[in-house]
Amino acid sequence: MAGPWEVLCVGAANLDTIALVDVMPRTDERVVAHAISQHPGGPASTAAVAVARLGVGVAFCGRVGADAAGQLVTASLQAEGVDTTLVETDGATAQSVILSCRESNTRAIATLVPEPPRLPAVPPRARWVHVDHAGYDAVAPHLADPGRAFRISIDAGNDIAGLRLAGVDLFVPTVEALRRRYGALPVPDLVRHAHDEGAVTVVATDGGQGCYVSAPDVPLTHVPGFTVEVVSTLGAGDVFHGALVAGLAHGFDLVEAARYANAVAALSCRALDGRSGIPTFDEVTRFLLDNGPQNPQGATQ
């Protein structure tokens, strides 16, 4: 999406080496891969690509190396229309090795820790600032500012050290991440704990089952996912986060935005990497018209 941006994604940008296998290897076992390829990845940068594909102006702030890997990662964002003015080129480009299992639709990831970005000030054009585990520290000082002009969205699928929820406008963990934080509780209790800590809106993702949404004006609601033919689920959560913010930026209400994000994440699973399957706004609109669930507004819990 070229032109002015309104969403800023802050955090990790990786170069992923992905192998597609039938079964996960056991210790000291060798398996044959169907394909091995390299693709840019990283939660916040993949979210930025999703936002751009869905027709919302977006910028990315992160750190990559001044090397071939960093150049490839940055060029891939620029090719999608993501503004990379705030990308820093010092340190090292984070890289990951990923085994994606075709039989079980699971994956195993070994990754280097990305260099955290520096963001002294949020540009005034930002309406949303979306951060992942690598970008949280750069944005955390703004959480206590009641006069800020932008809303903060947090991807909490990966654990974030020192995470504080007071001042978070949109908190998006997995159900599993909530249980790591609060214990083995039912979803309503998990979401209530997140609200009690200060998160205004909570969207808890549950893989192919969809997600649970809750806000001051929205009772806890389960929004079902979509069944698609899956090549790989790699990056689907990152895509969901970008699509959710894009939906809200488009003016959708919370349940509509969650259903929209479920559809975008499902469609992204049609490719081995986390990005090439991300649909455009028109594609996902057609998909939703053709695949409306029995209860498109979700089920109140």
Image: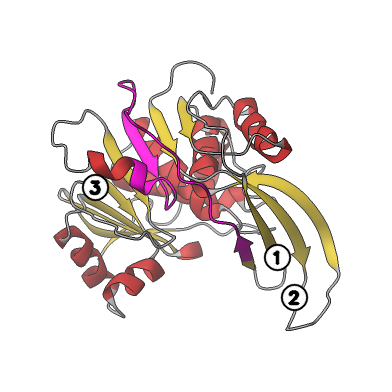
State the residue position of label 1: 99
Rendered image: mark on residue 23 = 2
- Left or right, 247 with respect to 254, comes to right
Of mark 1 and mark 2, the one earlier in the sequence is 2
Q: Residue furthest bottom?
A: 27
- The magenta stretch is 109-138
Is residue 137 visible in the rendered image? The answer is: yes
The vertical placement of 100 against 253, above or below, is below
Kindly report the distance in space between the C-alpha atoms of the residues bearing marks 3 and 1: 33 Å
Q: Residue at x 82, y 57 (%)?
A: 35
Q: Amino acid at mark 1?
A: Leu
Q: Amino acid at mark 2?
A: Val
Rendered image: mark on residue 168 = 3
Q: Residue furthest top?
A: 3
- Left or right, 81 with respect to 247, comes to right
Q: Amino acid at mark 3?
A: Val
Say which quadrant the C terminus sits in.
bottom left
Of mark 2 and mark 3, the one earlier in the sequence is 2
